[in-house]
Amino acid sequence: MEQVLRRKEKGNLARAFYRFKKNPLSLIGLGIILTMVLIAIFAPFIAPYPGDAGGAVHFKEMFQSPSWKHSFGTDEVGRDVLSRIIFGSRISLTLGIVVLSVAVGVGIPLGLFAGYFGGKVETVIMRITDIFLSIPPLVLALVVTAVLERNLQNSMFAIAFTWWPWYARLAYGQTLSKKEEDFVEVSESLGASRLYIIFGEILPNMTSPLLVKITLDMGYAILAGAALGFLGLGAQPPTPEWGTLVSLGRVHLPKMWWLSTFSGLAIFVTVLGFNLLGDGLRDFFDVEVD
Amino acid sequence: MNQLLMKTEGLCKYFFRDSGFLGREQKVIKAVDTADLEVKHGETLALVGESGSGKTTLGKTMIRIYKPTKGKIWFEGDEICAVEGDRLRHYRRYMQMVFQDPTSALNPRKTVLDIISLPLRIYQDLSRAERRQRVKELLEMVELPGDFLYRYPHALSGGEKQRVGIARALALNPKLIVLDEPTSALDVSVQAKILALLQRLRREFQLTYIYISHDLSVVKNTSDRTVVMYLGQIMESALTDDLFKSPLHPYTRALLSAIPIISAEEQEVIPEEITLVGEIPSPLEVPPGCNFVSRCQEKMPICETDEPPLTKVGNDHYVWCHRYL
Amino acid sequence: MGVRNTILNIEGLKVHFDTLDGTSRVLDGVELSVREGEVVGLVGETGCGKSITAKTILRSLPMPPGRIIEGEILFLGDNLLELSREEGHQVMSKKMSYIPQDPMTSLNPVFSVGEEMGDLIRWHGRRRLGPLELMGLRRRHDNSIAKAVELLDRVKIPAPREIIGRYPVELSGGMRQRVLIAMALIGYSSLLIADEPTTALDVTIQKGILELIEEKVKEEELSVLYITHNLGVARRLCDRIYVMYAGTIAETAKTQDLLDNPKHPYTSGLISSIPKLTGDEFKGIDGRIPDYIDPPSGCRFHPRCPEVMEICEQEKPELVKVGGGRLVACHLFSTGGES
């Protein structure tokens, strides 16, 4: 029996956390995101005026600047801006999750198949991917919302529509390199089913770049959603989506600055959080994403 | 045929590459060109050669990891060149492979248990507990502790990873194992242990090995018969001892003289000094005639035009060279 | 034969590496010397620190995370570790040459052989290049190409004029290694450090390269520090060998003395692990290479040593003379006893 010299290896998780801690910015990012998630989950309990998130109106209190009563002031119909922004976090997070779920769910398998099977499958899938990559997201969103109704769901659909090709590309590139590894040949020679090889052997090897990309993309998806909202193509009032809020408050600038500013800040902080976290993860895993 | 485990006749494996304008032309790489060989039950047959020799491709083609382009293969009397699907799977369980790079051979995202039990999950209907038990037995066979079950490859040394690869190859009780340079990625002190393990396993389980290597010192000490390959073709084949005592093919002799030895006694075993001039040609541009002609120091005019014929020179000693007609 | 000058002398070199899991003590007191006209082999297995030693001499080790804890590297009278980066670089570029390990990745793929060699010949030893020079505007009207052709000829490359125009990707491993050797001969003056130059090559090609190196060493009276894991190669080229294990020197002796009569148990173990053509039994060494972050106490080889004694776990053995110019770091010899 080979004698084994082994220092007690710290548990994998402990090592991982230690490495992650080295980068303070990524910890800040993590903090921001966790805070956001908690805010979104507990919105009804945190928001001072939960009723204001929807269509309530209090004309008596409109356009109040930030005060003790309303930390972020009130809007044009007297609703508490802070509460609306708090509930807006739910919308943004949901949007990010939905968009990415669709993009990943569609893009990754397509990329895997293109990379593994090669030949005609590869050509067809990657050419379609290329076509979609050349469509600017907002332009497509305009088209979609022109054809369909303007609402949050359709804006999510539009964004996901333009987002999946990046995941297809990621999976494609990773598959091309991983499929040359011997352990894939082993599975093939044992007669394992191709679906198993693709999803059971190759896919687990790309979780690092995938995780990094998803994290970074969450921020960008939320930003895209806000952009559509800002253009009036996404969530419609009274839904307190952050982009929509910025847009509505824009006409009242600079006098009633608190209407756009705080929602804009919310977008900024959220996207920053995902970026920091994503960069931290990227350094941590030491991977290239695209 | 009871003595023979495997036999190949005219076995070829070509790879095709598109080239030229718009990929209209096709270049052919004859990775293995007309291999005729026999593998006897219980022996270790060495396939020896340098880069481009085709030894790995031959090994993989013989056990149907690659589909042969031409020729025939018999496994225990059955011709297996054309079989597919379930029938092929039936044969595959008897022919396993151990790979050269222990890091690439193990999926970094899987535990040792997952890796070794993969063949069991595909071929056998065992319960989880039964599989676990079997994997533990296999770990014991390769001298690894049972608590390695849940380790990941990155926590293992090169030698340990290679043992895991061997355990996986043994999982289905194969008859034949193709070992593709199993120790060339390992340090020499580890190599000796792995080779000792392989010898022990061969005896214990009556295995037959096809041992692919470029290291003739190892080959001399572990194999019964040796086949020398160059650029896809077999140049010489003999009992290992005979090959060293009386190497015939000019390439074999050059190969032997290139072994870095560490003692004067070893020098006596290979007295000749031959240094080849020139490079190994690209497999895309194989010259007509004998594949070795560009570097052969004993070439004759006929070598450049005609393929060398097979000549039987002694008991189990064959050479493909115009000089021995 | 008179005493030759010592060109390189390393004493008590300790290098640590800061990693996420702790401090890796990769070199733990390396002693090494190369005299004029000698070929000295540094032999060891993977991870023993031989490459790190070379990189420390060449100052190409990233610092941090590397740290030199103590020790001296005396080269032609200067302690390289005390020179500033600039000064050290000057000394090295003018007086040392290096042949890297992997010919496949050591040449810049976007430059032809002629361009790469030409630049080296032209700018050899200069510290700063101006923008005009970098843009290649001062390239013409000099004889650097002719010199490059001559160098390629000296390393027996056939049709050197053709090769000048080729790109690395068009050359085989053996050819690339010859180009690297030719490049190492540019401006060589005192010490050549070769880091396993033939490891990645086929054995028949390796033979040609080893013969070339042997020839060049004789012709140009080179002083060489030759790093390898292959004792057979070391036997061929080296006058003296240092055997390295786990960041320390286990033993050093003249080549044939070492191979015929190894004293350190690791050396014996190593030699006996090599399969021999004479068919002698070969066995390995138990255990694995140690963890450099938490290395074994005392002698780093003690957990694997077949002749371990109590003291081996407690005290690290120093290199002691055992006659005939040999040094061994082993308690079997510390008190003058024979094994």
Image (cartoon, coloured by chain):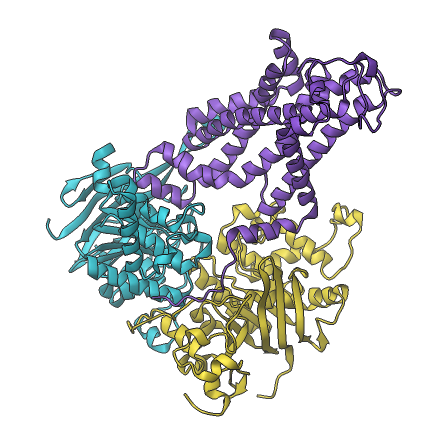
Quadrant in which the N terminus of chain C appears: bottom right
* In-image side of B243 versus C70 (left or right): left
Colour seen for chain C: yellow
Coordinates of residue C156 in the picture (x, y in percent)? 52, 60
* Residue A36 falls in image quadrant: top right
Q: Is residue B23 above or below residue B288?
A: above
Q: Residue placed at 57% from the left, 71% from the top?
A: C225
Q: Front-most of A246 and C338?
A: A246
- Position of residue A197 relative to residue A81, above or below, is below
Q: Which residue is farthest right? A: A255
Residue B72 can be seen in this image: yes
Q: Residue C98: horizontal and vertical position, in percent?
A: 61, 63
Q: Is residue C327 left or right of residue B32?
A: right
Question: How many numbered discs sit on the rendered protein?
Answer: 0
Residue found at x 26% / y 47%: B130
From the viewer's perspective, is B16 left or right of C15?
left
Which chain is tinted purple? Answer: A
Depth check: give the residue in front, C206 or C34: C34
Give me the chain that's cyan.
B
Q: Which residue is most to the bottom?
A: C336
In this view, the residue in front, A42 or A1, is: A42
Q: Position of residue A52 (x, y in %)?
A: 72, 19
Return the x and y of residue C257 as percentages of the image width and height. Answer: 44, 83
Rendered position, C175 above or below B110: below
Q: Between C22 and B175, which is closer to the camera in this rendering?
A: C22
Q: Is residue B83 visible?
A: no
- Placement of the C terminus of chain C among the 4 image quadrants: bottom left
